Amino acid sequence: MWRRRCFQALGVLLILSPLGIALLRPPAQAQLRHEEQLAIVIDDLGYDRADADALATLPIPLTVAVLPDLAHSSEVAERAWRQGREVLLHLPMEARADTGRRAGVGLGPGMDDAEVDAVVGAMLETVPHAIGVSNHRGSRATADRPLMEALMTVLGKRGLFLIDSRTTTATVALVTAQRAGVRVAARNVFLDNIPERRAILGQLELAALHARRSGATIAIGHPHPATIAALGEGLPRLEAQGVRLVFASDVVQ
């Protein structure tokens, strides 16, 4: 009789026998299920405590994007962090609908590195524990390459990653971040453009389909009652189907 020894390493099974070494890879479906990752980001927190209270009812990994300089920004970010959530600075940026530079709008074309650094630094002071940034609005700002290059310099220096909310198809944020070596990912699905439970459940299924096809996806929603209800109903079903819920930091590259 011959002896057989098996070693599992890097997803490959090695079988040693008198006939030599055979390489047996796990079934493709097993590999696919391991890669079906879904990150849920909840935007626009910081206006009041009620939104944070509602999210606390969801025992799932959630990434929360907190707007700066609001009455409850710091409190909400601190509470989310203590609950084991992941915190992002939801960085306001100019949109195409804006007419001229508005006070307090955040980042906009024409700002240099020093201005961007000062704005981001001041906003981070009001959102403790932020480990990354996502854009709030920003259809004009994220399409402006010089501004995005300045932002990536700041994010790289501070060790922050970027989630591009993709509020415009003209965005250059993703490619600019990649060229600058800043970890980045882009939003794939908006959950609640139609803030109704049934529609949101459909968007969750769309996000799961994208995760199955591409390995990982980011879905962005808001703390609407319908969104929270749909997440509580739909996410356990997706998990049972093999979709793994993760934080935004797990899918940035």
Image (cartoon, rainbow, N blue to C red):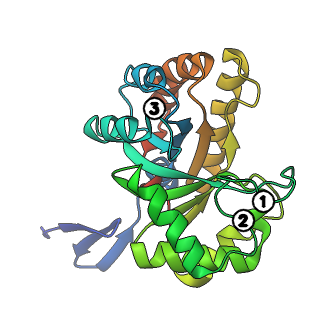
User: SS for tag 3?
Assistant: helix
Picture quarter containing residue 200? top right
Q: Which residue is mark 1?
A: 101
User: SS for tag 2?
Assistant: loop
Residue at the image point whose x is 66% and y is 69% from the top: 174
Q: Which residue is mark 2?
A: 108
Q: Is residue 194 left or right of residue 36?
A: right
Residue at the image point whose x is 51% and y is 58% from the top: 133
Q: Is residue 117 left or right of residue 159?
A: right
- Please report whichever mark, 3 or 2, sits nearer to the chain's N-terminal start: 2
- Please report whichever mark, 2 or 1, sits nearer to the chain's N-terminal start: 1
The answer to whether marks 2 and 1 mark residues whose Cβ atoms lie closer than 8 Å is yes
Q: Which residue is mark 3?
A: 239
Q: Quadrant of the N terminus?
A: bottom left
The answer to whether marks 3 and 1 mark residues whose Cβ atoms lie closer than 8 Å is no
Residue neighbourhood size for the residue with mark 2, other residues' Cα within 10 Å, grouped as few (<14), some (14–19), many (≥20) = many
Picture coordinates of residue 29 (x, y %)? 51, 49
Q: Is residue 8 left or right of residue 115?
A: left
- Front residue (pair 186, 87): 87
Q: Is residue 120 above or below residue 61?
A: below
* Three-letter code for the amino acid on which mark 3 is drawn: Glu
Residue at the image point whose x is 14% and y is 70% from the top: 2
* Three-letter code for the amino acid on which mark 1 is drawn: Arg
